[in-house]
Image (cartoon, grey):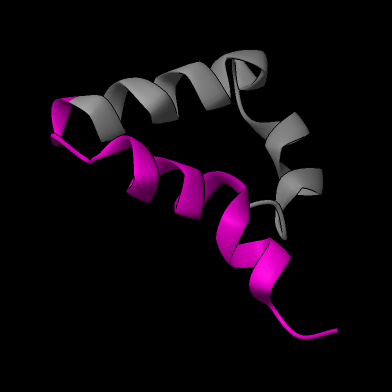
Amino acid sequence: MFGTDWSMMALEKNYNNYVPRMMEQLSAAKTSPQHQENILWRNAARYPR
């Protein structure tokens, strides 16, 4: 699930560009805007607490 490993991102070079790079890759893969939203936040919002 997106975000569960966020604390590890600080160890990556240029981690501030993670989300923009992810969006570029999703767009390059021709992922629909709806699926991009699912990946970025909707799946987590639907996950049972």
The quadrant in which residue 23 appears is: top left
Residue at 70% across / 51% down in the picture?
3
Image vertical order of residue 19 relative to residue 43, above or below = above
The quadrant in which residue 45 appears is: bottom right
Does residue 12 show up magenta in the picture?
no
Where the C terminus falls, by quadrant?
bottom right
Where the N terminus falls, by quadrant?
bottom right
Does residue 34 show up magenta in the picture?
yes
Residue at 69% across / 78% down in the picture?
47
Magenta stretch, main secondary structure, is helix
Residue 30 rendering spot, x and y as whole percentages: 13, 34
Q: Is residue 19 visible?
A: yes
* Nearer to me, 15 or 29: 29
Is residue 49 rendered to the left or right of residue 5? right
Residue 31 rendering spot, x and y as whole percentages: 22, 40
Q: Give the residue at the far front of this rendering.
A: 34
Total numbered labels: 0
Residue at 48% across / 43% down in the picture?
37
* Nearer to me, 18 or 42: 42
Is residue 6 rendered to the left or right of residue 19? right
Q: Which residues are magenta?
A: 28-49
Q: Give the residue at the far right of this rendering.
A: 49
Image vertical order of residue 21 relative to residue 48, above or below = above
Image vertical order of residue 20 relative to residue 26, above or below = above
Q: Is residue 1 visible?
A: no
The quadrant in which residue 40 appears is: top right
Is residue 1 rendered to the left or right of residue 48? left
Residue 39 rendering spot, x and y as whole percentages: 47, 52
